[in-house]
Amino acid sequence: MKKQLLIIGAFSLFGFTQAQDISQDQVPSLILNQFKADYVKVSDIEWEKEGEFYSVEFETGWNVDHEIWYNAGGDLVKHKEDIPTKELPLRVKEKIKEEFRNYSIDDLERISEEGKVVYKMELNSIWKQDWEIVIDAEGSILNKVAD
């Protein structure tokens, strides 16, 4: 609880982010055309601009959340998407089973950036410390924070 209050206080003091909500007509056509070509059937589209980057949050299929960042040149630089556990690579599943036996996976995201893919998730247990981890496709834990 103290951690949550500290985070809320920091956000209140410094602001949540420098990102600014923008309407679709404020998105450069190069970026908008690329997005529309790559993602045809989407819903709940929301655009933001942060510095030189444009991000778009949207849903596909059965309410699958995505967030994509484009640079000013229209290149996709980062993609974050919710995925089901069955889409985790075998090495990731094995590592979780080895180090977090009897934990459940929640809020699972696949993050692709600069040609690398990592998986971010919450690991919850009734009797043990909950964790938020980031793990690569080979099963190496890159970040582990008590939740």
Image (cartoon, rainbow, N blue to C red):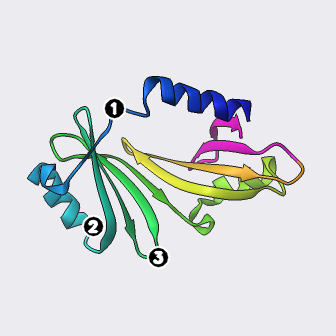
The residue beneath circle 2 is 39
Image location (x, y in percent) of residue 39: 27, 67
Disc 2 to disc 1, how far (Cα)? 26 Å
Q: Quadrant of the C terminus?
A: top right
Q: Is 143 covered by the magenta stretch?
A: yes
Mark 1: amino acid: Gln
Q: Quadrant of the N terminus?
A: top right
Which circle marks residue 90 in the picture? none
Answer yes or no: do the residues labelled 3 and 1 have beta carbons within 8 Å?
no
Which circle marks residue 62 in the picture? 3
| Magenta span dominant secondary structure | strand
Q: Mark 3 against mark 1, which lies toward the viewer? A: 1
Q: Is 28 covered by the magenta stretch?
A: no
SS class, disc 1: loop
Disc 3 to disc 1, how far (Cα)? 31 Å
Disc 2 to disc 3, how far (Cα)? 14 Å
Which of the marked residues, 3 or 1, is nearer the chain's N terminus?
Answer: 1
- Left or right: 40 in relation to 90: left
Mark 2: amino acid: Tyr
The residue beneath circle 1 is 18
Mark 3: amino acid: Trp
- Determine the residue positioned at 64% across, 60% down: 90
Image location (x, y in percent) of residue 113: 39, 43
